[in-house]
Amino acid sequence: MVREVVANHFLNGEARGGRFLITDRRLGFRPHRFNVQLSTWSIRHDEIESVRHEGERLLVIGVRGAAKPEWLVVSDAAALEHEVAALAQPVSDSIGAASNASAV
């Protein structure tokens, strides 16, 4: 576990309270028991297409192949944006380097 922060994750119109989990391999959300929808959510770092923050607290994570991004409300979205982007960056760089090498 790299980091765990209190967060809300939006799923089908419900802002579920719980924990946003950052590991060396995945991002995840574990809702607390007071939510209606209790399913967990997670993605591998190589599935992250984009990361941005809107305002101080909204973190938006674009997932490859998904029609809509994942939305999380956290205490410091800007700091988490940089942390998540840094974890996803090596994967993006290696994919880009491999495709550039094959083009030559």
Image: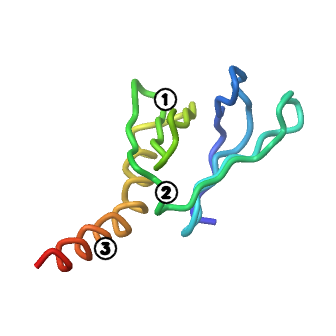
For the point 58% across and 61% down, which residue is it?
26
* Identity, as a three-letter code, of the amino acid under mark 2: Glu
Reading the image, the residue beneath label 1 is 58
Q: Label 3's element?
A: helix
Residue 102 or residue 52, whichever sits in front: 102
For the point 64% across and 66% down, which residue is it?
1
**For marks 3 and 2 on the same chain, the one whose residue lies earlier in the sequence:** 2
Q: Label 2's element?
A: helix
Point out the frontmost of discs 3 and 1: 3
Measuring from the top left, give residue 17's x and y in whole percent: 74, 32
Point out the frontmost of discs 2 and 1: 2
* Crowdedness near tag 1: few (<14), some (14–19) or many (≥20) residues, C-alpha within 10 Å: many
**For marks 3 and 1 on the same chain, the one whose residue lies earlier in the sequence:** 1
Q: In the picture, which quadrant includes the C terminus?
A: bottom left
For the point 52% across and 42% down, which residue is it?
66
Reading the image, the residue beneath label 3 is 94
